[in-house]
């Protein structure tokens, strides 16, 4: 892959956020045929097939699922390179039809026919919940002792499982994607990002090239998602508040498609449901922004790299209504509003934005969301000891 070298960046304490990088060539061939990876005269990186492969081999691809048609899940799973491990976390309904059983059948069949490493877990599995309890990571459990609903909750579980599998990188891919080709591309971009990263704490976030919508009986290609526009605007305002310079650096506030090094996954804080992607940025600023006392000296002495890649394929997923978008905006802005890094003037603007969208009633308080501690808190020995043996075997295969 040939990818632009980012010209601009923003520093926020130990965080380095790079500007959006364009992909110039999706496949740049084998090493021996490619020009040098880093060339002073050329404004791009060239990542050879071998380099990409070496990273993909160390990557777990997590697919969070909740009631997504099987045909879509199948297309997504078939698009993941065979040398990546796959972890499907499903919170699909069991009634009236047992969707999870159908998904498990699909996954077992893929493992049998392709021989690829692939695991599926049920978010509401009692044994997994018990293993988390034994591992002292109880925050994610509800009153009945079962993992709570939510995309973020499924992702946190998957990251703990990826750690057990020994993978160095974790990439997320939404299950409701109609274009398997785009899934394949996102994974290549994760690998490219990790390949150019110089830190062991890195994150790659995808901003898709465009999204097809139907408008006046014609196809119209939008540039940014409906919730991303708002989330990005506020994240950029937050950075500007501290630097004193207006910025548009953040383009991936709600990036469902993102990947992070397992080392980074262990130190970040997490939040519930759809707010988790926005909270990545907030947690990075809270912990490593240099604004408060530092919980992770180790990381502050290092640095964190956040890459944003502009993919070439269009993004086409299940269309959700205005309510879903408004809820997503509310959840995203909520984690910003309740952060100690959010200044009062911005808090005011957040409330104005939400009331103007009817996402918040006049005089209504913006309630605090739910947060989860870093995964470094989890006792992995106890977790592994209490997980079903069959699961450990497929995870480590
Ligand atoms: P959007 O694409 O950001 O608008 O949100 P989606 O509703 O498409 O959700 C993104 C992905 O997360 C999809 O693959 C969903 O099936 C999945 N998802 C949503 N809620 C949950 C959940 O509670 N648990 C799990 N494991 N996955 C979920
Ligand atoms: Co979606």
Image (tube, rainbow, N blue to C red):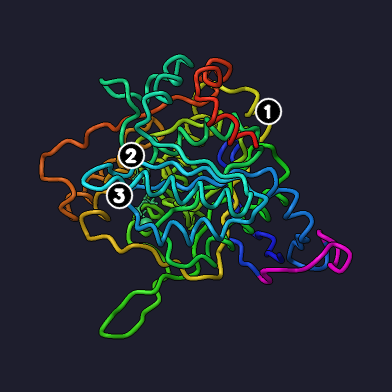
The residue to which callout 3 is attached is 328
Residue 380 spot, x, y in % from top left: 56, 20
Check mark 1 vs ligand 1: CB closer than 8 Å? yes or no: no
**Which of the 4 quarters of the picture holds residue 282?**
top left
**Which numbered marker is on residue 1?**
none
Q: Is residue 266 above or below residue 3?
A: above
CB contact under 8 Å: marks 2 and 3:
no
Real-space CA distance between mark 3 and mark 1, rounded to the nearest whole angstrom: 34 Å
Real-space CA distance between mark 2 and mark 1, rounded to the nearest whole angstrom: 34 Å
Left/right of residue 164 with respect to residue 107 in the rendered view: right
Determine whether the residue tagged by mark 2 lies in a helix, strand or loop: loop
Check mark 2 vs ligand 1: CB closer than 8 Å? yes or no: yes
Left/right of residue 46 with respect to residue 289 in the rendered view: right
Real-space CA distance between mark 2 and mark 3, rounded to the nearest whole angstrom: 12 Å
Nearer to us of marks 2 and 3 is 2
Q: Answer whether residue 25 is magenta in the image.
A: yes
Q: Residue at x 68, y 56 (%)?
A: 192
Observer-nearest of 92 and 13 = 92
Determine whether the residue tagged by mark 1 lies in a helix, strand or loop: helix
Residue 373 spot, x, y in % from top left: 44, 24
What's the magenta region? 24-38
**Which numbered marker is on residue 301?**
1
Q: Residue at x 40, y 27 (%)?
A: 372
Determine whether the residue tagged by mark 3 lies in a helix, strand or loop: helix
Check the picture and name the quadrant holding the N terminus. bottom right
Check mark 3 vs ligand 1: CB closer than 8 Å? yes or no: yes
Q: Is residue 57 above or below residue 34?
A: above
**Which numbered marker is on residue 150?**
2
Residue 201 spot, x, y in % from top left: 64, 37
CB contact under 8 Å: marks 2 and 1:
no
Q: Residue at x 30, y 64 (%)?
A: 319
Q: Answer whether residue 180 is magenta in the image.
A: no
């Amino acid at each position: 892959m040939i990818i632009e070298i980012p010209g601009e960046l923003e520093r926020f304490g130990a965080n380095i956020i790079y500007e959006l990088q364009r992909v110039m060539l999706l496949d740049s061939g084998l090493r021996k045929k490619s020009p040098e990876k880093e060339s002073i005269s050329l404004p791009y990186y060239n990542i050879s097939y071998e380099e990409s492969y070496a990273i993909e081999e160390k990557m777990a691809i997590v697919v969070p699922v909740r009631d997504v048609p099987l045909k879509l899940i199948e297309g997504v799973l078939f698009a993941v390179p065979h040398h990546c491990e796959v972890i499907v976390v499903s919170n699909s309904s069991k009634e009236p039809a047992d969707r999870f059983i159908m998904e498990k059948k699909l996954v077992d069949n893929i493992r049998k026919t392709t021989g690829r490493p692939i695991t599926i877990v049920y978010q509401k599995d009692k044994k997994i919940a018990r293993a988390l309890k034994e591992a002292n990571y109880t925050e994610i459990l509800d009153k009945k002792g079962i993992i709570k609903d939510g995309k973020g909750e499924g992702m946190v579980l998957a990251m703990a499982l990826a750690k057990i599998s020994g993978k160095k990188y974790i990439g997320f891919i939404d299950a409701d994607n109609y274009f398997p080709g785009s899934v394949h591309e996102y994974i290549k971009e994760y690998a490219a990002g990790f390949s150019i990263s110089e830190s062991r704490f890195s994150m790659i976030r995808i901003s898709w090239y465009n999204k097809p919508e139907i408008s006046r009986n014609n196809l119209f290609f939008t540039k940014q998602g409906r919730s991303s526009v708002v989330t990005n605007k506020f994240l950029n305002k937050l950075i500007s508040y501290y630097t004193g310079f207006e910025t548009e650096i953040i383009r991936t506030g709600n990036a469902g498609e993102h990947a992070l090094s397992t080392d980074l996954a262990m130190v970040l804080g997490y939040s519930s449901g759809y707010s988790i992607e926005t909270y990545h940025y907030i947690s990075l600023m809270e912990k490593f922004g240099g604004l408060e006392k530092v919980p992770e000296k180790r990381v502050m002495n290092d640095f964190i790299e956040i890459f944003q890649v502009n993919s070439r394929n269009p993004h086409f997923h299940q269309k959700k209504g205005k309510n879903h978008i408004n809820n997503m905006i509310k959840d995203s802005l909520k984690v910003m509003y309740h952060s100690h890094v959010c200044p009062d003037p911005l808090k005011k603007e957040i409330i104005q934005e939400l009331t103007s969208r009817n996402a918040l009633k006049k005089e209504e308080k913006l309630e605090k969301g739910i947060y989860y501690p870093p995964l470094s808190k989890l006792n992995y020995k106890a977790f592994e000891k209490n997980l079903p043996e069959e699961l450990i075997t497929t995870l480590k295969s």
